[in-house]
């Protein structure tokens, strides 16, 4: 298996940085922020679709960067929780939307991948 070139890894890191900001930090207020994931969660179906698509995209980036299995599992946990909150909305109205607005799963998964890239490639 051929190693990724440094420019490929830099591109993945940069793409992940963009998603990190778009999904969870469009509006930043100190250590807190809201992004497209938190805003779109209030739109039925659209929010879930956005969350799942971005989660899959981040996982693909992790595989392309050849992240360690532990990093990929951590990312899957963050992204799985982030995406699953929208699926339990029937039991407690608005609770999943509030959780999805506050829980920044895409941001946490992106940071985990970026740390893995920094420790293994740079």
Image (cartoon, grey):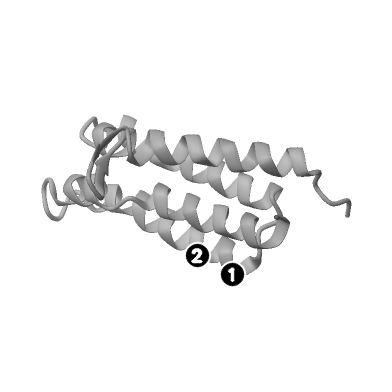
Residue 17: percent from left, percent from top: 50, 40
- Front-most of 17 and 92? 17
The residue drawn where x is 12% and y is 45% is 94
- Asked whether 72 or 90 is in front, the reply is 72
Question: Which disc is residue 17 wearing?
Answer: none
- Residue 22 vertical position relative to residue 73 in the rendered view, above or below: above
Residue 25 seen by the camera = yes
Q: Which residue is mark 1?
A: 70
Pointer 2 residue: 74
| Count of numbered circles on the image | 2
Q: Residue furthest right?
A: 2
Q: Where the N terminus falls, by quadrant?
A: bottom right
- Find out whether the residues at labels 1 and 2 contact each other: C-beta distance under 8 Å: yes
* Residue 119 at x, y percent in the picture: 64, 62
Viewer-proximal residue among 47 and 23: 23
Q: Is residue 87 left or right of residue 74?
A: left
Secondary structure beneath disc 1? helix
């Amino acid at each position: 298996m051929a190693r990724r070139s440094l420019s490929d890894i830099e591109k993945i890191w940069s793409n992940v940085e963009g998603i990190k900001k778009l999904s969870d930090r469009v509006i930043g207020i100190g250590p807190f922020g809201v992004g497209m994931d938190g805003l779109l969660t209030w739109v039925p179906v659209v929010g879930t679709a956005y969350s799942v698509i971005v989660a899959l995209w981040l996982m693909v980036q992790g595989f392309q960067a050849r992240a360690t299995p532990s990093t990929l599992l951590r990312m899957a946990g963050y992204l799985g929780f982030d995406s699953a909150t929208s699926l339990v909305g029937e039991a407690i109205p608005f609770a999943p939307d509030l959780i999805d607005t506050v829980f920044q799963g895409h941001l946490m998964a992106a940071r985990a991948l970026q740390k893995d890239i920094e420790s293994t490639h740079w």
